[in-house]
Amino acid sequence: MGVNLHDSAYDLEKAVRQSDEYANLKNLYTEINEDETARRMFENFRNIQMELQQKQMTGQEISQEEVEQAQKTVALVQQHDKISKLMEAEQRMSTVIQEINQIIMKPLEELYGNPENQ
């Protein structure tokens, strides 16, 4: 009898929600939202980030002014203790997701071979 991959995926989702990394990220996100100044700064940062990603995805050129604005915003949010901690937690969560993805993709890499190793 085969394994139902969707059931396993939902089990993995549950495990992510119960992980220390997710709990930490969620708590920090809640702290940001409860602090009006931090929330506005973080929303501004995310909006700039999303606008630049959208432009990049659609092949639009990003002006030097937009790059400088983004760099200033990043420098500003990194100086805010709560936002800086949230960004670190996001990075840890992203690393965990990448590691999980590598594990999930292992059977296909073994079957087809890893192009990086050829």
Image (cartoon, helix red, strand yellow):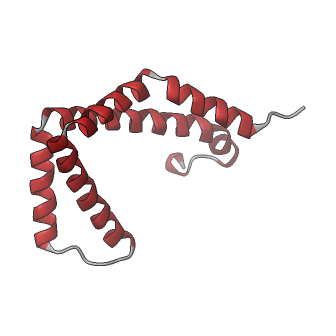
Q: Residue at x 48, y 34 (%)?
A: 99
Residue 87 showing in the rendered view: no
* Image quarter of residue 60: bottom left
Q: Is residue 39 above or below residue 3?
A: below
Q: Position of residue 29 (x, y in %)?
A: 31, 36
Front-most of 42 and 105? 42
Q: Residue at x 47, y 37 (%)?
A: 97
Q: Is residue 46 left or right of residue 113?
A: left
Q: Residue furthest right?
A: 1
Q: Residue at x 79, y 36 (%)?
A: 4
| Residue at horizontal 66 percent and vertical 44 percent from the top | 108
Depicted 77 relative to depicted 48: above or below: above
- State left or right for residue 115 relative to residue 3: left
Dividing the picture into quarters, in which one does residue 12 lie? top right
Furthest residue in direction bottom, as rendered: 60
Direction from residue 65 to residue 13 in the image, left or right: right
